[in-house]
Image (cartoon, rainbow, N blue to C red):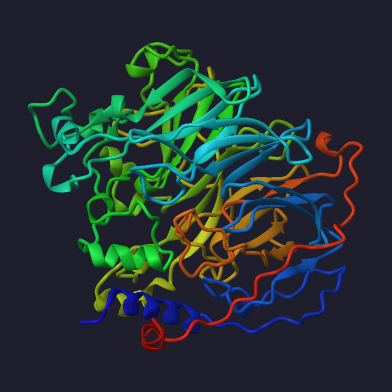
Amino acid sequence: MRTFKSVLFSIFLLVFFSCKEEKPSKEVVEKIEVREWKAEDTRSLTGLTVERGLKEKTALATPGYVMIAPPESTKSHLINIDGEVVHSWVGELAIVNHYLKENGNLVRLEVDPDFPTFAAGGQAGRIREYDWDGNILWDFKWADEDELIHHDIELMPNGNILAISYEAKSQEEAIAAGRDPEHVTKAGLWPDKIIEIKPSGKTGGEIVWEWHMWDHLVQDHDPTKNNYGVLAENPRKINFNLFGEILPPMTEEQVQQGIKMGMMTANATPDNQHSDFTHTNAIAYNAELDQIAISVPAYSEIMIIDHSTTIEEAKGSTGGRWGHGGDLLYRWGNPANYGRGTKEDQKLFFEHDIKWIPKGYPGEGHLMVFNNDIVHPDNTVPSMWAVLMQSKSPEVEAAVGVLGNHSAVFEFIPPTNSEGAYILGENEAFGPDGPVWAYTAPDKYSFYSAFVSGAHRMKNGNTLITSGAKGRIMEVTPDHKIVWEYWNPYNDHYRMPDGTVASPIGPFKYMQFRSTHFTKDFPAFAGKDLKPLEEQPEPFIFKMPPPPAEQDSVQ
């Protein structure tokens, strides 16, 4: 039988060679007209063979700067639209995500080197705030056996920070709450909660508000439990027995090989491979509505909750500005989850990022999301990332079919009544039927990132898109023209103290979780010298590893 290592390497080769693309010219020329689009330029899933850095800068590109973070790195870079680094923040811990404040400070979500228990990608545990020169102003830890902040944070106007956190529940607790025992691993489950942190001192933080997904579950499996109910009659509750795709069980040897190859983090075990059953990966806040939006990709939905509740109201179904307590105010993407739709009604597929378009921007008040893994109707494999985690050769061979999947960026408008409440008709799903604006590649499939990624509207109406798996960043106009394009050239090979990866990226060596565009007049840049650094960071040049047989012979 083939080893897990050789299977993963076969997948790597399949991804690499089936998607190989033409290399563009090394010379980057500023053009007045938008270049002719070619599928061959973007077909690779990993982008490992692509000439990287600035690929396109037209006269229509928006002046300003873009914030990026290399994978496997402790650095945040600010680049100009010529692709040159003009400022960097260098920390000690691996970065997950970052936000630049108007005063020039940088708030980063980072990976705590000692976090226990959790192993699902996006793990963090630390929030640090740096001044412009990289000095640490605040260092907050939320990482123990029971809780861990992960994936994303949101800076609030009052100076507080919203964060996504796991909270560990045992196998017994999950079954007692109505989970089908056949779908609970020995390690239990990790439902998400939202915490609001009020920073204090150098390391302190008070939790001033919280919301627990655990308080808003419904299940139709065990009628003896308090949360038993009909899904279609509880559209504001979260189906606790939605299982998604269950992959074959992995052995300890396979898990250790996955850790060694950078496909899993050190805390991975055979017993926790399905503990992260929601994988919430993004959070946004709308101060005017006092609402929080989260992206829940394992459910292929975005969900909105009421932040105006008290902590006690957030546990129940009444209270708050909108009257529903901590139950969902709105959800969109997959109405089959709450019994008011079918597979054909699904709009989102393992989505990432979620943002309200700010006031004063074209489309203000609308929502924007990166729709990662839109499944081709003829595809028998649900997700490319799932294929990378498979352990049997038939699934490896089926990976070819995954190339029919594609990504899109959706801008959509949640229907509301005259009072601003989200409309939900009797026995109907939440609207809308589809986006008011979407971006896909002309041929669809060559714009594809099965994981990470994001998008945000710019003030001039353009949209900055991060196709994260390959580290591709582009500015597109409302009529879908690419006016600026940059491919991240960096990977700093950061490793945890035990030598393992901080976040599993496998063959996606240039990936970007997200990127952010700032105009030149952003207040943080006032009085700052933003000339290109004399010593630019060293690009990472990918070299094809030897076949498994050769690797084994030298070990």
Q: Position of residue 407 (x, y in %)?
A: 51, 60
Is 245 on the left or on the right of 62, as rendered? Answer: left
Total residue callouts: 0
Residue at image point 83% right, 34% down: 523
Is residue 367 visible to the viewer in this orientation of the structure?
A: no
Of residues 507 and 331, which is closer to you in this image? 507
Is residue 427 visible to the viewer in this orientation of the structure?
A: yes
Is 308 on the left or on the right of 333, as rendered? Answer: right
59 vs 420: above or below:
below
Is 62 on the left or on the right of 42, as rendered? Answer: right
Q: Position of residue 249 (x, y in %)?
A: 20, 61
Residue at image point 59% right, 32% down: 139
Of residues 430 and 498, which is closer to you in this image? 498
Residue at image point 53% right, 63% down: 469
Q: Hey, which residue is sitting farthest left in the picture? A: 224
Residue 15 sits in which quadrant? bottom left
Q: Quadrant of the C terminus?
A: bottom left
Q: Position of residue 181 (x, y in %)?
A: 12, 42
Of residues 14 and 329, which is closer to you in this image? 14
Is 231 on the left or on the right of 514, as rendered? Answer: left
Q: Position of residue 346 (x, y in %)?
A: 37, 50
Residue at image point 18% right, 46% down: 186
Q: Quadrant of the N terminus?
A: bottom left
